[in-house]
Image: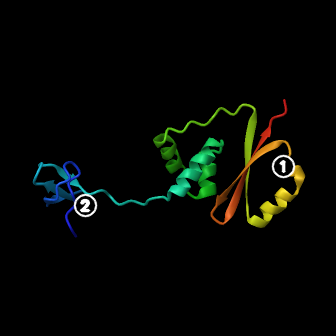
Amino acid sequence: MKNPICPKCDAMHVVKSGVIGERQRYHCKQCGYYFTVNKVGKSIDSYYVTKALQLYIEGISYREIERILGVSHVSVMNWVRKYNIKPPVQAVYHPTYKVMNQAELVEYIKNGGNLKGAGMLITELGDKYMMIKWKRFKE
């Protein structure tokens, strides 16, 4: 394996300098900086990050997002903090959602009564579709 580039000065003259916590440590000969290589972790596709944040903004709980998308609710919380997402105050409406396949979605939309008195958003979730509706509370 080729030695990495120094993250501080971008020099290529780097030598191995021991192991810390089962990770190789390196020393830059140019600036004297010690560093370890980045830990390769499991990355989640940005598609799921975007969907999770959209669902959060719509008022769906972290645990529900976990059940729908199959990503950890802790990951969703971390993304909300990282991107500083604030959900709008939802005093006069309440979002509900359904996950359907294409045939179910077509049948649902064919019934005109399902479309009245509410706003609706349809989004793709892999091979399924999620419909989010906003029904106004009756006061």
Residue furthest out toward the bottom: 1
Residue at left offset 48%, top offset 45%: 78
- Pointer 1 local density, CA inside 10 Å: few below 14, some 14–19, many at least 20: few
Residue at left offset 63%, top offset 47%: 55
Quadrant in the picture for the N terminus? bottom left
- SS of the residue at dot 2? loop
Q: Position of residue 45 (x, y in %)?
A: 50, 59
Q: Nearer the viewer, mark 1 or mark 2?
A: 1
Q: Which mark is residue 115?
A: 1
Q: Position of residue 101 (x, y in %)?
A: 73, 64
Q: Position of residue 95 (x, y in %)?
A: 73, 43
**Marks 1/2: CA–CA distance:** 58 Å
Quadrant in the picture for the C terminus? top right
Among the 4 quarters of the image, the one containing residue 93: top right
Residue at left offset 54%, top offset 39%: 85
Q: Which mark is residue 90?
A: none
Does residue 85 lie above or below 130 as drawn? above
Side of 42 where 54 appears, left or right? right
Work out whether residue 134 can be spotted: yes
- Residue carrying label 2: 22
Q: Position of residue 48 (x, y in %)?
A: 55, 56
Work out whether residue 72 can be spotted: no
Side of 96 where 138 appears, left or right? right
Q: Are the residues tagged 1 and 2 within 8 Å (C-beta)?
A: no
- Pointer 2 local density, CA inside 10 Å: few below 14, some 14–19, many at least 20: few
- SS of the residue at dot 1? helix
Among the 4 quarters of the image, the one containing residue 108: bottom right
The three-letter amino acid code for the residue at tag 2 is: Glu
The three-letter amino acid code for the residue at tag 1 is: Leu
The mark that comes first in sequence, 1 or 2, is 2
Does residue 75 lie above or below 87 as drawn? below
Residue at left offset 75%, top offset 32%: 92
